[in-house]
Amino acid sequence: MKKSFIFLLSIFAFVSCDMKQDTSITSFVNEENIIVVSVPEPDYTNQHFFDVTQYADSVKFVRLETTDENIIGRVSNLLFSEDYIIVADRQTASIFFFDYDGNYSHKIHKRGQGGDEYISLSHVMLDRKNDIIIVHDLELGAMLYYDFQGNLTSRISQFCDRMVARDIINLPTGDFLCYRQDALGEEDKYQAGIWRAKKDGSFDQFIYTIDYDYKSTFVQYAYHLSELPDNKVSFVDQNQTAVFYVDDNNIVHKRVQFNLPGKTEADFPYESSKDEGYYSIFTSQEKGNFIFTQWITPGGKGMNTILTKSTGKLEVGVAFSPFAFGLFLPIGSFVKNNDPHICSSWFSPIVVNEFLKGDLPEDLRKKAEKTIEGIPSNEIEDANPIIQLLYIKK
């Protein structure tokens, strides 16, 4: 069964550009304890790779075993438990369990309309403390809880009064943070913003909402909320070009303010005036001590920044490095996971196979071959994805 994959430029730690000026410290902390970052225009004519080992301790490739029982359509998100890498696949509405060597164990596939079934895997989360898989089904408006063998342990039939959420994170308390970037109506419960839901599924409160005079908005991207090491959650406001975090008391704090070298979307209150272009955040995530952000420039080019929170060091760039740690690091599709210290992506073995057909130095060829070692070339198109885990420095 052939599968087609769309590969996004997403592992932000592989980008850099050698700036002419000193960019080792380009930020400061103001009196409100906000990191203020001045982002320079990258030099697109002078692209250089930087050392990924500045930001990560190691990288691991996990080749997911392929069997007749576990053909993966598309990796929607990854969950890491003590014993398993858990792959949520919205395309097949299945949740697959692999060990950390990629050996297939079993799956949960409960598609249907019975009391213990779901129609779609809108969001899949993990209660790590109790080894419980949490499934949000937007079509049913339900939240379902399964043990690792797929047995339903509890169900909330009208989660948050069926409010539409584009992203959800389960909190250690059992409550949830929910996110929607698009306003669906004039009533408060349909507005764009971030709200908290109680563990019984009832709506609690909005803690951040869109300013309708066009001063704030969210990125139009599938993943918005980032889990932080201290059980906090961060998010990005696109128009303010800022990163915020939510504390345990539902208070929102601005963490980082990016000052761009040109106009941003907030400078254009009307859709018809955007033709001249502007800087826009495509997506952002916090991992360990770093904030990785991908931007779109007024000319439509990609720009990436890496901010080291503890020192204020900023890296800006556009070029991708193919390897680090002495290993081949192919570009894959970024995929959300529940570990605040791991950047994860997935890619088809075809990517490496196509890479091998090019004009490569022999040492790099050998490193790339190891990535798909053991997969017969005639089975590459039917093989399950390879998961790439980049362990970010703490």
Image (cartoon, grey):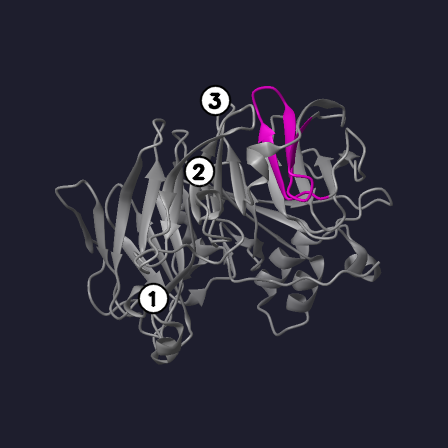
Q: Secondary structure at mark 3?
A: loop
Q: Which residues are magenta?
A: 120-145
**Label 2 amino acid?**
Trp
Residue 294 image position (x, y, % from top left): 41, 59
Q: Is residue 347 magenta?
A: no
Q: Which residue is label 1 attached to? A: 265
Give the mark nearest the N terminus, 3 or 2.
Answer: 3
Residue 339 image position (x, y, % from top left): 50, 36
Residue 185 image position (x, y, % from top left): 49, 53
Q: Is residue 121 magenta?
A: yes
Q: Secondary structure at mark 2?
A: strand
Q: CA distance from mark 1 to mark 3?
A: 36 Å
Give the mark nearest the N terminus, 1 or 3.
Answer: 3
Say which mark, if any, is on residue 195. 2
- Taking 180 as reference, is 22 left or right? left
Q: CA distance from mark 3 to mark 2?
A: 15 Å
- Taking 251 as reference, is 329 left or right? right
Q: Which residue is label 3 attached to? A: 173
Front: mark 2 or 1: 2
Front: mark 3 or 2: 2
Q: Residue at x 81, y 33 (%)?
A: 114
**Label 1 amino acid?**
Glu
